[in-house]
Image (cartoon, rainbow, N blue to C red):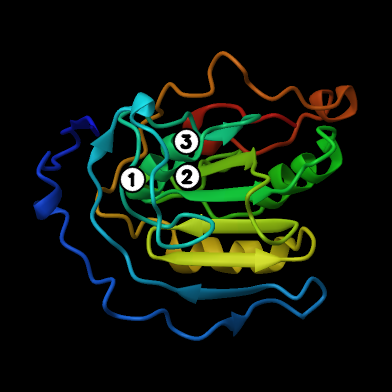
Amino acid sequence: MVLLLAGCGESSNPSDASTDAAVGPLPWMPLGDGTCGARARRVAAIAGVHVDPSAGPIPWLTNPPSSGNHYGVWARWGAWPDLPRGNWVHNLEHGGVAMLYRCPSGTCAETRDALVQAAASFPGDPACGPVDASPARVRVVITNDNLIETPVAASAWGAVYEASCVDAPSLRMFYAMFAGRGPEDLCADGSAGEVTRARPSRRRRRRAAGVRPGGAPAPR
């Protein structure tokens, strides 16, 4: 039996999770200069309810997930290791973007740091405060995800992105196009990820510049 927890203005009745899934995804569109084969597309978005983590796997329409059911707790904006999909899909509902990387070896600090650096180039988010704040405040979650089909992927509510490598310009384009489009416009930090925050390399920790997702310093 699945335990559904209502929250964030959602109904606990699965029948209320109306869907536009009958509308197929739009064609892929290339992003960037083609260096990493980056591309993105809009996909059907379904309303979500809060599901208890003990209830078992959540069936999502896309890989990576881009809408639907999720856990009741969302993540702090920033970079975290092994963040469950159920947590960061909740961030998508709040208008955030998840930037993901495949890491079968378990040691992918270079890729993670490249994504953090890419997020540092994103425009400030007006939902998070002054757009000219320095460092920028953005709604981004970065984590490893070995279930994605490409080395790098990203997801927003109703949109997905994939690439063969970290391509900052195309990631910035994806963020500009789809961030802030979730059913709830919220920049507040969640709590998932606080205990196991990803530790960046010492070299990056020494750098003064960096991105401040949602107002919290991100690993550098």
Q: Give the residue drawn at x 83%, y 30%.
A: 204
The reply, left or right, for residue 35 in relation to residue 194 is: right
Which residue has dot 2 on it? 139
Which residue has dot 3 on it? 214
Q: Earlier in the sequence, mark 1 or mark 3?
A: 1
- For the question of whether residue 129 can be seen, the reply is no
- For the question of whether residue 158 can be seen, the reply is yes
Indicate the quadrant containing the C terminus: top left, top right, bottom left or bottom right. Answer: top right
Q: Give the residue drawn at x 70%, y 76%.
A: 32
Q: Earlier in the sequence, mark 2 or mark 3?
A: 2
The reply, left or right, for residue 31 in relation to residue 89 is: right
Q: CA distance from mark 2 to mark 1?
A: 9 Å
Instruction: Check disc 3 and give the amino acid type.
Output: Gly
Which of 98 and 27 lies nearest the eye of the viewer? 27
Residue lying furthest front: 1
Whether residue 94 is situated above or below residue 33 in the rendered picture: above
Which residue has dot 1 on it? 94
The reply, left or right, for residue 57 in relation to residue 105 is: left
Instruction: Check disc 2 and give the amino acid type.
Output: Arg
Q: Give the residue drawn at x 79%, y 71%.
A: 36
Q: Position of residue 196 (x, y in %)?
A: 62, 17
Instruction: Check disc 1 and give the amino acid type.
Output: His
Query: Does the residue at mark 2 contact the one at mark 1 (Cβ under 8 Å)?
Result: yes
Q: CA distance from mark 1 to mark 3?
A: 12 Å
Whether residue 15 is situated above or below residue 206 in the rendered picture: below
The reply, left or right, for residue 217 in relation to residue 5 is: right
* Numbered badge on residue 205: none
Whether residue 50 is situated above or below residue 216 in the rendered picture: below
Q: Position of residue 128 (x, y in %)?
A: 40, 40
